[in-house]
Structure formats: structure tokens, C-alpha cells
Image (cartoon, rainbow, N blue to C red):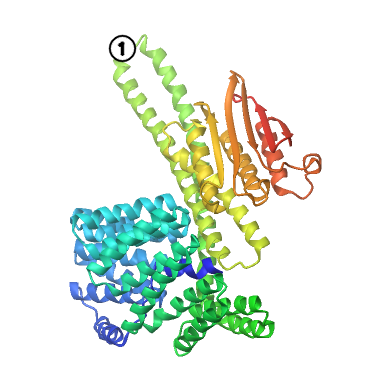
Amino acid sequence: MKKSFLLFLSLFVLCRLNAQDKARIDSLLQEVESPKMDTATVYAYCYLSSELVGLENEKANFYAKKGLEVAENINNPSMQAWATHVLGESYDYLGKADSSLIYYEKSIALKRTLNDKDGEGASNIGIGMLYFYQKDLGKAEQYFNQALTLYTQVHNEKRMGAALNNLGAVYRNQHQYEKAIKTYNQAYDLKLKTNDSVGMVNALANLGTAYQYLKQYDKAEKYLMQSHDILQKTNAKNNQVMNYAALAQLKMEQGKYAESKTFLEQGIAVGKNLEQPHEMMELYKVYTVLDSLSGDYKSAFQHLLLQNDFEKKISQANSKREMEKLELIYQTQEKEKELALRQTIIQNLNKTIWMIAGISALLLLALLRLFWLRSKLHKSNRQLNDLVKEKENLVKEIHHRVKNNLQVISSLLNMHVRKVQDPQSKKIFDDGISRIQAMSLIHQNIYAHSNLQQIKPREYVEKLVQQLFVTYQIPDKAIKIQTSIDDVDLDIEKLMSIGLILNEILSNAFKYAFNGSKSGIIDILLHQPKPNEMEMIVKDNGSGISIEMIDEPGDSLGMRLIQAFSEKLKATLSIGNVQGTTYKFTFNPTQ
């Protein structure tokens, strides 16, 4: 529960439209009732989209499209860059990550031609947020750092602070709390220097959250109270509710139930006249737990009912967005059909290439007698090389699209699992997500690799391990993974089987091997002792797998998958349970 609203608070402070903003929007709405082909109309459309995103996302998307249409008609690159950015932002809030990424990248390309480093930084921030919510923290960090570099070059200290705040969120989710705290402090100094009160509230709340994770409650309270004081001075009631919830959660963790209850009552008093169902739901969620810890189960039940009331309001408001998610799934299925059609085209292309190769062989024989055919044969060979290159490009494109579709599916599951309360159901989702990500990684490596037939497994295994640490939220230094992987080439099918086997073994080890212990070691060995023999050994020093599980996997999907992919490798599998669990796979890498 703490994670649900503290992550929300750590990323941004939600700002609602005030009376002045609404008056401005009303004025712009009147202007676009009779649109003209000029920059003023583009400005009106883009400003409306920016203000409505997060509140009325369909309208925000509609106005962004209209703005881009007019900007392209009047051939204004600067306005096109702005319109593509707000269009990417609106697609992000609609949950269409692939479309959002396309328009953010188009905006970056336009801004580079205009040397608009400030605008380019904003689009990098947008892409970073996309990857952040997909739990691809490495890419999120990369784009946030690019934005920070661009803002630094143009001395935009306010936006430098925003980029640092986002980097702090990345480090905190990677459990690098000290690094996160240092980054948040840098962000706060810039926000203070630029007199950005909203930014200061954000940075201080993030610092409080980081110290709370470290259980340094005095420091956590100090920063959360500083954030609270600024909100009180600026009378920012819309943002006070989540601040009260955070303070109540902190006091509850400290066992100071009376103070926690005081903050909850203050938050409810502020929020009851505001339209903030998410924030009120979080308040009552904390209140329910507090009542349970205090032994007041009657009050806990009443607060649980109020929490459910706000959840229903949120569910009703999100029904339209759920329909859009279903539409996205449909679109994904359509793309899969398109990929199947492309595969058929490639198969036909293979037949054509072999036919051309045969004709070329005949031409080579004819060249022994016909010197004047040399130029024609040269031309034919060049065409053949072009076709082969086109085939390789098509194959790489297919792997790229498969990777993108798997990432979209992973993102959809991630968005859905945030709403799952049942631990067992959440575990099933997390297992499914990790398997999808394991398959996605191999397609990503294939797309980036120059040789489509043979790929080195070391980089793939390291990325898979890193992804699993993020998926299962393994704390820093809790589990140490030691790898020794020979620099060999493996074909795509074998590497896919190895990746899925490792995914299951490591997932099981993270969940069961160490029985809550603070430390553990897992060794991964992949080497080739003989030309036609490959060995993969995975060993942990945990509690060890039971003999019953080895002999009769039963309903264990993980063990059944390990055995299935072992058979696909044509590998000999042995499992030991002395001083931990050891899996040994022996197979022929050339078969």
C-alpha cells in the first residue's frame, strides 16, 4: 500500500486547472470554433491539448492532431515540432505507448533541425517516462540523462531540476537510495534557486520517501513536513491530500498511531470538498490498516467501505480507458497477422533467391565461352546481393516488430497488475511478464546483431538477469549472481530455450530458494568443454529443492517448462539438492 501512493507522489505533484486556466481554455475554445490556417490556430490547438492531457485525454489527443494538421499545411517546422510533442504526450495518457514513442521521436528529429535543445529535452523526458512505467529503468535513465544534458547546455535550471527529480525516481526504484537522495538534493537546490514552489514540494516529498525506505524516519519526517509547510503557505489544497496520506503512513510505520490518525483526519477534511477520488481512496486505505493495527475492526470495516466507494468512482471513470486498452490489444493482434503475412512473403522470397542463384550458376558456366555476357552476369549478381540484403532487413524488421509487440503486451500486463490486490494473482502476472520479457530480449538482440544466424549468449544472459532483478524487486546485494559464460555462438532457437530455462530457474530461486534470507549466491556457468558438447550449470546455495518436486513436478508450471525446453534443446538434465539446488544441462550446440 505504501508503494502505491508514495510512487505516485514521488514522480510528480498533480496540478489541477485553476479559474484563470479555465478562462484561458474557454478563450481558446472560442478561437478554434472558426479555425484558420495560421500559427495562432496551431497555438490554440496545442495549448488546449497540453492543458487537457491527464484530464480529458480524448479531447487532448483530438486537439493535438488538429494542431499538427494545420502546422503541416502552413509548413511551419517549429509548430510541427510542438504539435508532435503534445500528440505523443496525449497518446501516453491514453495508454498507447507505441504511438506515443513514434511522435516523441518525430518531435526530437524536428527540434534537432531547429536547434531547439530545450524542446528536445522535453521530448526526451516524455520517452523516459514511457520506459519508466514499463519498468525499463535502464532506458528511462538514458533518456532522463539526455534531457539533463540538453537543459544544462541551454542553462534551463528549472527543467534541469525536473530531470534530476526523474533520475532520482529511477535510482530509488533500483534501490540505490543514497544515489537517489543525492540526486533529489540537487533537484531541490535548483528548484529553490528558481523559486519553483511546486518543484520544491516534489523534491522534498521524494527525499522523504527515500529516507522512509531506508527507515530513517526522523529525516523522512523532516522533508515531508517541509513539503507540507510549502503546500500550506501556497494554499495548494489539491496537493495537500497526498501529503497528509504520506505523513500518516510514516507515523503508522513508527507506531505513532494517534499522530497518524490526526494527519488522516486533516487530509479527509481538506479532500472532502475536492474531486480527488484517487487521493481519498489512498487516505482511507491507510486508515483501514491503521484501524486494524489499533484493534478497532468496526472502524476498519467502515473505512474499508469508504475506500471501496472511491474505488468504484475511479473504476467508472476508467471504463472508457479500459475499452481503449481492449482496442489496443485488437490492434496488436492485427499487427501479429501482418507479421505472419510478412513471414509468408519472406518464404516466397527465399524460393525466388534460390531460383536466381541457379540461374546465376548457369550464367557462370556460360561465361567460360561467352565473354560478352560478363556485364550482364555482373548486373545479375548485384541484384542477387540486393535481394539477399533486403531479405536480411525484412527478417530483422520482423524481430524488431515482435520485440515491440511483446513490449506492448508486457506494458499492458504491467498497467493491469497495478490494480491487482491478491498476492497470488499478482505473482501469476509477474511470472507471465518475466517470461514475455525473456522472449522480448532475444528478439531485441537479434535485431541489433549483424549475424542473424549466430548470437553470443553472454550479453543476453546479463540483460535477462538485470530484467529479473527489476521485475521481482530484489534489493541491492541481497542476492549475488556470478556468471561464467564462454564467448561462443549459438543459434536463435537454442538461445531462446536457454533464456526461458534461466528465467524459470532464477524466478524460482528468487521466490523460494533463500526463505527470506538477506543474502544468497547463484552461479551460472555456460561453457563448451568439447566441440560437440555444451554444458549449462545453474547452482544456488539456498534451501534446496525437494526430492518430490524433482521426481514428480505435479502442478509446478515452472518445472514443467524447464523440462519442456530441456527436451527442445535435446539436453540431458540432472537436478541435485545438496547444499542448495543444482541444475545441469548437457546438449550438442550444433544439432
Q: To which quarter of the image does residue 574 belong?
A: top right
* Residue 283 placement (x, y as % from top left): 53, 79
Q: Residue at x 33, y 69 (%)?
A: 65
Q: Residue at x 57, y 25 (%)?
A: 527
Most foreground residue, 548 or 340: 548
How many marks do you count on the picture? 1
Answer left or right for 77 relative to 574: left
Most foreground residue, 586 or 196: 196
Circle 1 packing at 10 Å, graded few (<14), some (14-19), many (20+), is: few
Residue 283 in view in this figure: yes
Q: Is residue 523 above or below residue 83?
A: above
Most foreground residue, 134 or 154: 154
* Residue 401 placement (x, y as % from top left): 46, 48
Q: Quadrant of the C terminus?
A: top right
- Secondary element under disc 1, as helix, strand or loop, is helix
Answer left or right for 460 relative to 578: left
Q: Residue at x 36, y 9 (%)?
A: 369
* Residue 37 placement (x, y as % from top left): 20, 73
Residue position for label 1: 371
Q: Is residue 302 above or below residue 228?
A: below
Q: Is residue 367 above or below residue 498?
A: above
